[in-house]
Amino acid sequence: MEYFKKLGTGNLLMLILCAIIILVAEYLFLTGDQYHGIFVGLWAPTLLGVMIYLKLVDHGGK
């Protein structure tokens, strides 16, 4: 439980959002809408990249 406190509410919500995006992308891909599944599936790594960038910018300012 200490790990989640250390992670922070904002980051935890973004990670949950990434998991939901991955599930939606898999659903779209497996139901035959492959192009939309790939498109939506690329949102998760983009969101994770933004999280990493914001964390680096925040630590650079301290």
Image: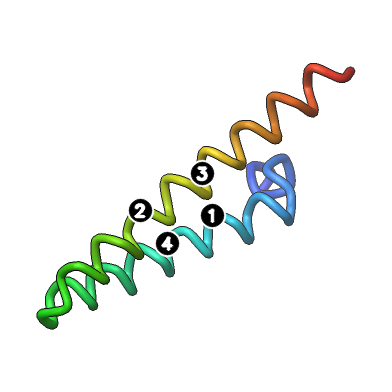
For marks 4 and 2, the one nearer the N-term is 4
Q: Which mark is residue 42?
A: 2
Q: Label 1 belongs to which residue?
A: 15
**At which x and y percent is residue 11?**
66, 50
Who's the residue at 61% across and 41% down the image? Answer: 51
What's the amino acid at mark 3?
Leu
52 or 38, nearer to the observer? 38
**At which x and y percent is residue 46?**
47, 46
Q: Quadrant of residue 23?
A: bottom left
Please state which of the two labelled residues, at mark 3 or mark 4, is closer to the viewer: 3
Contact, mark 3 vs mark 4 (Cβ under 8 Å): no
Who's the residue at 41% across and 66% down the image? Answer: 21
Say few, some or many: other residues with alpha carbon within 10 Å of mark 2 (under 14 / 14 to 19 / 20 or more): some
The C terminus sits in image quarter: top right
For marks 3 and 4, the one nearer the N-term is 4
Q: Label 4 belongs to which residue?
A: 19
For marks 3 and 2, the one nearer the N-term is 2
Q: CA distance from mark 3 to mark 2?
A: 10 Å
For marks 1 and 3, the one nearer the N-term is 1
Q: CA distance from mark 4 to mark 1?
A: 6 Å
3 or 50, nearer to the observer? 50
